[in-house]
Image (cartoon, helix red, strand yellow):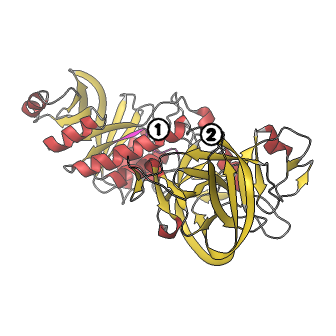
Amino acid sequence: MRLLTIPSLQRPIIRKPVSWQRAISGRLTLQKLPGTTRCLTRCAAATNGKEKIVWIQTKSKDVLTTALEAGLSTLLFDSASTELQEEWKQIGRFTALTVSEDGDILEDSKKVGELKHVASGEELKRLQSEQLSCGHLVLDMSDWRIIPAENMVAALQSQEARLLPIARSAEDARVMLEALEAGTDGVVLHTQEPAQVRELAAWVQQQRSNRAGGNEFDFAEVVRIQCVGMGDRVCVDMASLLVPGEGLLVGSFARALFLVHSECAESAYINSRPFRVNAGPVHAYLATPGGKTAYLSELKSGAEVLVVDPQGRQRTAIVGRIKVEQRPLMLIEAETADHVVHSLLLQNAETVRLVGPAEHSSTAFREGGERDEEGKDDEAAGWRAVSVSQMQVGDRVYLRQQGAARHTGIAIKESIVER
């Protein structure tokens, strides 16, 4: 066991080491655990599906309108802003919460929470000993970097009240919502900049889409496999571990993206690398968050990509490194039910796989890529990962179709022909 020591707390948190597959199979979703006892490692199965709470605190009318347009309709005011509340009610409908002089948070004179100021680890420790059942606990930390978000979440995990720290930017808000995986129950975004509201709203919407499950795949039947020579191919190494079935959506054309499996499988020739997807050559399109695409050649450390599983569920991952190397390539063409042929290029390697529906037969592709009785776990789940070195005409693969016309990765309405 290893100890994660948190300053100013009485007891250390003990974490058991786990394998990467166990760690990811219990991956947290951004949801809140019901009840008064909240475990630090809240997992998806234990949550009740409630979404994160976002309140806005501002004196800017532009921020107000941006928030309302984004669906963020709860605003927090200080006690001196009564006239501002009444003025803004002419702009749109919103829930107005007022912080009284003694720190109570009121909605129509009814107490719904408390505001606490914390400026040191000792103050956080004292707050930890209090049993707060006020509904919502808004935490104003003069500099949350002095008291890391992880410490805040760990210290207050047993509180019944929902924890909403004040963040001064969308980036800070995201750190708090993701701290120690479980994150806080929500945030109060204090800003005078509409762009910060838009950024946070977009991120919250993306998390909602990730939890809800992604789009369904179309089936495509492989009709042509051909070695085409050398090219510059891209390996995408992510700062996340992928589990069997997960991969990236890649295609030679934006209109149709194939699910390229990660290198999480063990091989007779190379160790597993569950953080890597050998995604194809530099010209290929890759799905990114927000319904956008990017060229593989554009990716760099710190970029976000979309990780997808065979059920269409999706999440974001951070790119840690890109490797571009000359390798032999294969052309794979697959035809959908509407008799349209789509294609992509991939490295001719045993570790490169496309995900497709299970064949429900006595043979399956095991993780090494050979046809065998093994690998039935994937078949039972309704999918299989087919190595391009073992792929045959007639194999079926998953494919996601979308609009072909793109401008800087954003879908647009335009007539376009690609071959």
In magenta segment, residue 107:
no
Given the image, on which type of amino acid does mark 2 rest? Asp
At 62% from the left and 46% from the top, the residue drawn is 340
Q: Quadrant of the C terminus?
A: bottom right
Q: Is residue 54 left or right of residue 239?
A: left
Which mark's residue is nearer the viewer, 1 or 2? 2
Q: Main secondary structure of the magenta part?
A: loop
Q: Which residues are magenta?
A: 182-187
Reply above or below: 74 against 335: above
For marks 1 and 2, give the CA distance: 32 Å
Q: Is residue 318 left or right of residue 340?
A: left
Which residue is label 2 attached to? Answer: 338
Q: Is residue 187 visible?
A: yes
At 80% from the left and 61% from the top, the residue drawn is 266
Q: Callout 2: 10 Å neighbours few (<14), some, many (20+)?
A: few
Q: Position of residue 113 (x, y in %)?
A: 31, 30
On the image, which quarter does residue 89 sit in? top left
Which residue is label 1 attached to? Answer: 208
Given the image, on which type of amino acid does mark 1 rest? Arg
